[in-house]
Image (tube, grey):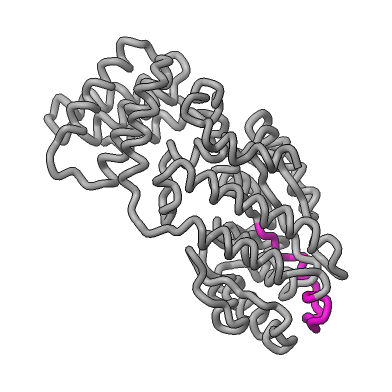
Amino acid sequence: MAAKAELLAARGEHEEAIKLIEEAEQEELDPRPLALARARVLLSAGDASEERLEATRKQLEEAAKEQGLGAMDLGDLLRAIGRINDRFGRYDDAFGSFRRAAKLRRGNYDPRSHTMMTTKIIQDWTVQNMSKIVRPEESGEKFAFVVGAPKSGAGELADMLGQIEGVRVLGPLETLAGECVRHLSARQGVLRPVPLEPQQIRGGQLREAAAGYRAQADGLGASDAQRAIDTHPLNIPLLGAAALMFPGVQIVMCRRDPIECTLACYCQAMPGNHPYAGDLLNAAGFVADCNRMMEHWAKVLSALEPGANIVQVHYADLASDPKRAAVKIAQEIGIDAKGEDIERVPELGTGPASHTEHYQSYLKQIRDLFTPAAKA
């Protein structure tokens, strides 16, 4: 019932969604998912009354007191409470809820190791080292890798591109990482395997890796596609390998203001393995490392001959006019697209990250982190 209500809200039928939730409450169904669904429905409606939102916040706080709640369930409740407080302008209370939710994230993460890995990739994967490798002669322009720091709009852009005729979205799957492990001696990195020392890679290895990747892509329906798009969020360290496997490959880099990106990672839900997002400074460091790698690849892969077709898109453009931005990107990677090809537009530009000025007292440490990069 809760899921059906959220689907109705996604279609713009907010009152119908609320009525469905009220019917479920009268039937005395589990109140926690219903309260969470009510919060999501009201928050997605721009004209929701303060009275309704406040009543829902109280329901959520009662639900969050339940003993034995799983970390994911409690985190969802706390983030919903945070978003309601954010809507009311209670920014201290909102951040407190987001912080409690972030601390529930599990997994080990060593920010120093990730930064060292990033630096080694930048040092190893140079034009000089990559140019010495014999690459497959076939064109790789069919494949497009859409990458970006978390919450930079990569997933939303891929969703829109996937609606265009002739485009097949492959991910997010571990296809590229798997081939790097099997054929390019990739070793376990901080979060996933990463190939280092490209000067030790041989042409035969690249051909085998490319053939393996193509076979998997074809198995996912890419054989007849004009463009096949890989959307794995942790593909950034592997872009050098992708460019060697597929000369002329398409690479779309999604960029967002790093403070906005960090706050979004910290405050919003992050399905999957994102242990860095449990700490604000670690999240900022991860975003900074992603941006460092993308800046490196944009420079190096553009200079490689034949290199990659690098296309940049800014989150602000995606948020202000999603269809127009997606069509522009599609055309830049060789897809004949029009605005009417995209029927479903994902939600962009909402939440705490859309107004970081209200969280300045909490963001001083990450502002200091990003200031040297901004000046450089």
Magenta: main secondary structure: loop
Can residue 351 be seen? no
- Residue shown at the point (70%, 71%) measured from the top left: 124
Asked if the stretch drawn in magenta spans residue 1, the answer is no
> Residue 221 appears in which quarter of the rendering?
bottom right
List x then y, in percent, for residue 118.
Answer: 61, 61
Q: Quadrant of the N terminus?
A: top left
List x then y, in percent, for residue 205.
Answer: 67, 86
> Residue 314 appears in which quarter of the rendering?
top right
- Residue shown at the point (62%, 63%) measured from the top left: 237
Question: As rendered, which of 154 and 134 lies closer to the eye?
Answer: 134
- Residue shown at the point (69%, 54%) measured from the top left: 294
Q: How many marks?
A: 0
Q: Quadrant of the C terminus?
A: top right
Asked if 96 appears above or below 155 in the picture, the reply is above
Asked if 289 appears above or below 239 in the picture, the reply is above
Asked if 53 appears above or below 149 in the picture, the reply is above
List x then y, in percent, for residue 98.
Answer: 37, 33
> Residue 206 appears in which quarter of the rendering?
bottom right
From the viewer's perspective, tell me whether residue 44 is left or right of residue 334: left
List x then y, in percent, for residue 304.
Answer: 84, 67
Can residue 188 be seen? yes
- Residue shown at the point (40%, 15%) measured from the top left: 88
Magenta-drawn segment? 129-145
Q: Extreme bottom residue here?
A: 204
